[in-house]
């Protein structure tokens, strides 16, 4: 599980987040996004940094639990008014 801070992804001045899950370390996955390897376009273009305070306490977890938590965390951030990408 990992969360990336996105700077102004919709061009309206609001911050956003990308929520994802991976078998890699969050740092390695973020580096892949930025390098264009299996990348989300929004992370590659607007991704600024990882936000470990939102996910570090959750890792590690099983794949099944990560799928549930990815959705839950994305929805929680949306309810707080953030733009959220990923979190399928």
Image (spheres, rainbow, N blue to C red):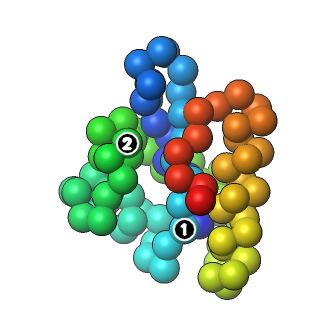
Q: Position of 21 compared to 74: left or right?
A: left
Q: Position of residue 53 (x, y in %)?
A: 66, 51
The crowd level at tag 2 (other Cα within 10 Å; few <14, some 14-19, many 20+) is: some
Q: Mark 1: which secondary structure?
A: loop
Could you say where residue 36 lies in the image, as x and y percent from the top left?
A: 22, 57
Q: In this view, does 16 lie to the left or right of 32?
A: right
Q: Is residue 7 left or right of residue 18?
A: left
Residue at the spot of label 1: 21
Residue at position x 60%, y 55% in the image: 87
> Could you tell me residue 6's position as x and y percent?
46, 36
Say whether marks 1 and 2 touch (CB < 8 Å). no
Q: In which quarter of the image is the C terminus?
A: bottom right
Position of the N terminus by quadrant:
bottom right
In x, y percent, where is residue 74? 67, 49
Residue identified by numbered label 2: 42
Above or below 31: residue 49: above
Residue depicted at 53% across the width and 45% down the height: 85
Q: How many callouts does the rendering have?
A: 2
Q: In this view, does 57 lie to the left or right of 42?
A: right
Per the model, the C-alpha gap separating discs 1 and 2 is 16 Å
Disc 1 crowd rating (10 Å Cα; few below 14, some 14-19, many 20+) is: some
Q: Residue drawn at (48%, 79%), measured in percent from left and top?
A: 23
Residue 87 visible to the viewer: yes
Q: Which of disc 2 and disc 1 is earlier in sequence?
A: 1
Q: Which residue is drawn at 75% across and 57% down?
A: 72
């Amino acid at each position: 599980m990992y969360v990336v801070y996105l700077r102004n992804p919709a061009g309206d001045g609001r911050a956003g987040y990308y929520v994802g899950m991976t078998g890699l370390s969050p740092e390695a996955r973020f580096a892949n996004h930025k390098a264009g390897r299996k990348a989300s376009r929004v992370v590659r273009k607007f991704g600024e940094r990882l936000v470990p305070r939102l996910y570090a306490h959750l890792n590690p977890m099983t794949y099944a639990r990560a799928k549930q938590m990815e959705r839950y965390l994305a929805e929680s951030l949306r309810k707080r008014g953030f733009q959220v990408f990923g979190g399928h």
